[in-house]
Image (cartoon, coloured by chain):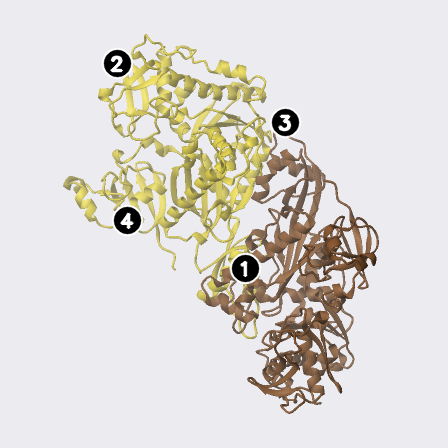
Chain colours: A brown, B yellow
């Protein structure tokens, strides 16, 4: 099989580039570039939503679906459906605003460092002398002795490799691609196969995954899916409880994730027409609890003080233990964790954002159901990390009309003299509030004096009323909402946010105090995570979710943990650095920190008008 | 659990000693010493066969079964039933001739070298600091850091170890026995557990196994059982055919052996009251085909010229791959093989008999369904090995009245002026011929001129007659046999033996010629294997089964392969030597050797009267 051609696709106006195989659809290319195009039918050519314009370069001609779905005017203006259009050369593509699920989501993953590919896996193209009456060496011996001529000094292989070797060599005419790790042979494949890797950010809520060419570092395909454990508990603690209290609960939760990961891998491989046996390495990052559940490690001691992990070492786990269909001898790398609630995903985020090498006094925040914060002081080897139980409120959970950041979610709110100004995702009629909308609402209510410093909603303020759960603020009345129901922010919602921001604010204060770092000394704040990257920073500072650091620049870096997973996958240097980061990071346990409770109580206060 | 007491048992008149745990029955002690006591009921106290006399030392008093089965006279003379008598101190035991299945079987395993214990597995007794609010290291980290104080420099463990670690430490009060191999932790167990190993000789016909204390080298229990693959083919080639021709045939054959091995291991552990998780290492030796079937390696290329193995390397296979319930991280060592038909069992035999270091020109023969022969020339690094397809005739198969060496088998035959002198095992009425009886009969018939040089039975000789399969020689008429049928040796039987001895003789001639070794230069012949150790050497030389080497001494060493497996299990030196032996041994393929067929035709001749 000759290596197929690959071309660069450039997306305007977002300035993203991606290199994909010839005949990839523009929809797949956009996915690989991390761009979410609207596509209700999932790429079946039925909905007509994924409209794009090919500015330069060659692509396949209009097909019957496009003829049917695009108007004459659209076609005259060069519109195409991304799912129907396959590239035949380098192309430059224009993305109309309507085709994007949300424009601002494209700002992520900027300003992050990169690692050149330097994989643990070596690839050898070999031609092996077949046996004769005068050369009766065992098949494996002739393989190893041929590899020795390619300066490979090793000679072990797991049984599954030995079991398929004799057959493979006899069907490929004694030519093969050999994938090896150190002295161990992981797979013997037909000639000209590429070594692929699988990088995963296993979030409590969402799983993001990449399929990567290990030698070029090119991301060949990306995918994401909800964490299937959600139905067994939204946050980490409730899932640990489920695993602990139900017979076989841990096994069930592990199986759910294993199955989902294997399905994603299968999907990504299908997208690029590659085989499972080519996938010779993987890296999965996640918080400590997610990692324990993934590996079916004991969790009883993790769920109660002093919150001790079963293991914090980096692990290399045989792929079959995680139910992953990969090359016969492939292992999955699990980076080290820092503490009971600061996991390998935070290590990956520190790595990808270069926090550990920063020349400035820098804070790194990864905001999620659990929020991890690390402090870098230049000149000191040690980083200090804390973990705050911020809860799922910013992900829209436990909020009366909360929702994920999807079509119709209110994502921006302003209270002006004329009244409320709302922006929804895709400009659809509002159906709920996503994290940034919740944040904006509360910040604006504070600014307007409608939320008191103790968090109480002013029931006499404009837009306020008393509902069945106490005071609530009406954002959209039912006759104008997409759901037909009133969209409101309740007193209880405000209190949820109060707890979340209080936990983060108090944690940060303890972190700065404990390390003797004055607030005004902090020079940079790196904010990672999906929510953290799309919110209004001024509002976050206003309500005290982000610290008010007079001299600090904020940098929103998107899903840096996922990117870190990719670097750990393809680069030996990055893998070693991750171990170093974990080793160098001191974990400061807040729940047993003497001053924490007092700080926490104080941090729950909202600002004065 | 305190270490239980162990006592030495001495068996007279055979001079065997064995150390066993207190309250072991004398029947089990005899088994562990390799002594086969008659016991039709298998040790249930029902048959009364396993009579012994306790000469000195303490044992449990007569029980009800013994009162019932032993006569008053027996009891007065101190007779006990071995299966009912448990030792309470050092004892000296007399074995009456009637209680032994066959006396000569006790001569085995003499003159073999020993290796001092030097296991790959290290054992550490540790006490680990429990976590506190000020010490929140992960459980695995505190284990590894404690081990570092015991000069253990490592820190990996397979997932199953990590999964049980937290629970184990919390139930043993943070004290543990840790078993490690190199830098890897294999098992974390309650305090004071011993590291055990499992050594297996996986024969085509019979499986022999030992349970060994890895640190003392003591064999704690032994067992043997038929190879369950026998029902799928008696010899190697028919089993390979079965595996190849039947869908899932290879999987089935592997499973059969895995299950049997796991059952033996369970039995041995029961005998000494130990746990599976204490079994931290294993070594399985077998011929190349048995090893391929055990590991489910491909066999198509092994079954046809040029007979190439899938692998000849030493392997360390995770125990679960072989269905063996051992310590979580335990592996099974499979020593290297020499050629398509000279396996790790021959390597183990060479090791145990010290053939590779012999100061004499020495031949090593391992006679079985397949016969392997190695030649050692002092001063030369290289050994040369051949393999002859000698067939199962000497194991009693393919012989009209052939049988295994069991009660009632004719094991010695002499033709004298007065007629036939026959000896049967246990002096029971004859029911068939075992290997040594077959050999004696043919040798005596040659000596008496009743078999011609071309192998034809003289139909006019005394005792000869013409039966339905041609000429046959009557050994025992039906009215005096144990089965009521005539026991005969047929013309076809003679031809089977002729093929077997022809193959061995021709192979030996080629081996000597090819290496330029004159017959009179050979100084020593080591004969291993069950059959080889019990036959009449003079008769074997007479018919040409053993070479007539004027200056050679013969040494019968019994199951040296099984002993070699034990040394490879407990000694790193032995394990490395096995690899060296395989590397140093040149395999000479007979079937493609130019002169072999001519030699084979000539070697089928029997000697003149």
Q: Quadrant of residue B437?
A: top left
* Any part of residue A520 in sight: yes
Q: Nearer the viewer, residue B262 or A500?
A: A500
The answer to whether the residues at label 4 and label 3 have Cβ atoms under 8 Å apart is no
Quote the CA–CA distance across marks 3 and 1. 50 Å
On screen, residue B42 above or below A556: above
- The residue at which mark 2 appears reads as B418
The answer to whether the residues at label 4 and label 2 have Cβ atoms under 8 Å apart is no
- Bin the neighbour count of mark 4 within 10 Å (Cα to Cα): few under 14, some 14-19, many 20 and up: many
Tally of marks: 4
Labels 3, 1: one chain = yes
Q: Nearer the viewer, residue B467 or B541?
A: B467
Quote the CA–CA distance across marks 1 and 4. 54 Å
Labels 1, 4: one chain = no
Residue A124 placement (x, y as % from top left): 70, 42
Q: Is residue A548 left or right of residue B445?
A: right
- The residue at which mark 1 appears reads as A256
Quote the CA–CA distance across marks 4 and 2. 48 Å
Identify the mark at residue A132; answer none if there is no mark.
3
Q: Along the polypeptide, which appears first: circle 3 or circle 1?
A: 3
From the image, state whether disc 3 or disc 2 is nearer to you: 3
From the image, state whether disc 3 or disc 1 is nearer to you: 1
């Amino acid at each position: 099989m000759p290596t197929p051609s690959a071309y660069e696709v450039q997306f305007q106006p977002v300035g993203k580039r991606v290199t994909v195989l010839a005949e990839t659809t523009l929809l797949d290319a956009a996915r690989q570039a991390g761009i979410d195009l609207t596509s209700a039918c999932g790429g079946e050519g039925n909905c007509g939503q994924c409209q794009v314009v090919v500015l330069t370069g060659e692509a396949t001609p209009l097909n019957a679906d496009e003829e049917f779905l695009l108007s004459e005017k659209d076609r005259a203006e060069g519109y195409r459906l991304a799912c129907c259009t396959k590239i035949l050369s380098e192309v430059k593509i224009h993305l109309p605003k309507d085709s994007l699920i949300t424009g601002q989501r494209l700002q992520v993953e900027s300003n992050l460092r990169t690692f050149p590919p330097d994989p643990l896996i070596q690839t050898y193209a070999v031609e092996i002398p077949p046996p004769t009456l005068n050369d009766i060496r065992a098949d494996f011996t002739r393989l190893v002795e041929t590899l020795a001529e390619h300066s490979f000094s090793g000679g072990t292989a797991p049984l599954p490799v030995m079991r398929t070797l004799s057959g493979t060599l006899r069907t490929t005419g004694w030519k093969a691609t050999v994938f090896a790790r150190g002295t161990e042979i992981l797979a013997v494949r037909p000639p000209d196969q590429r070594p692929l890797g699988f990088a995963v950010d296993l979030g409590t809520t969402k799983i993001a995954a990449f399929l990567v060419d290990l030698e070029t570092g090119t991301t060949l395909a990306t995918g994401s899916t909800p964490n299937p454990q959600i139905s067994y508990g939204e946050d980490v603690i409730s899932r640990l409880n489920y695993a602990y209290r139900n017979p076989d609960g841990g096994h069930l939760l592990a199986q759910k994730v294993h199955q989902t990961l294997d399905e994603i891998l299968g999907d990504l491989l299908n997208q690029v027409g590659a085989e499972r046996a080519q996938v010779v390495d993987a890296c999965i990052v996640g918080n400590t609890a997610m990692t324990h559940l993934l590996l079916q490690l004991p969790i009883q001691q993790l769920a109660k003080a002093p919150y001790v992990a079963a293991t914090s070492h980096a692990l290399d786990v045989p792929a079959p233990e995680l139910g992953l269909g990969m090359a016969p001898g492939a292992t999955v790398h699990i980076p080290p964790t820092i503490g009971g609630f600061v996991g390998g995903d935070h290590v990956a985020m520190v790595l990808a954002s270069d926090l550990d090498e920063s020349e400035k006094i820098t804070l790194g925040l990864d905001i999620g159901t659990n929020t991890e914060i690390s402090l870098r002081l230049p000149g000191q080897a040690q980083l200090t990390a804390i973990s705050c139980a911020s809860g799922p409120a910013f992900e829209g959970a436990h909020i009366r009309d909360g929702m994920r950041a999807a079509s119709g979610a209110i994502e921006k709110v302003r209270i002006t003299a004329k009244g409320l100004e709302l922006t929804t995702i895709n400009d659809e009629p509002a159906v709920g509030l996503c994290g940034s909308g919740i944040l904006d609402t509360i910040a604006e209510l504070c600014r307007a004096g409608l939320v008191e410093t103790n968090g109480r909603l002013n029931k006499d303020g404009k837009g306020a009323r008393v509902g069945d759960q106490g005071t609530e603020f009406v954002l959209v009345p039912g006759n104008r909402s997409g759901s037909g129901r009133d969209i409101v922010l309740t007193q209880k919602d405000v209190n949820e946010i109060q707890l979340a921001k209080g936990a983060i604010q108090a944690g940060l204060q303890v972190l700065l105090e404990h390390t003797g770092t004055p607030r005004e000394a902090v020079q940079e704040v790196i904010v990672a995570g999906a929510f953290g990257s799309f919110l209004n920073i001024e509002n976050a500072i206003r309500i005290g979710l982000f610290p008010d650091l007079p001299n600090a620049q904020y940098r929103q870096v998107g899903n840096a943990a996922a990117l870190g997973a990719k670097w750990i996958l393809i680069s030996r240097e990055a893998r070693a650095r991750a171990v170093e980061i974990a080793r160098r990071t001191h974990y400061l346990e807040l729940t047993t920190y003497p001053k924490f409770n007092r700080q926490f109580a104080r941090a729950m206060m909202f600002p004065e008008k």
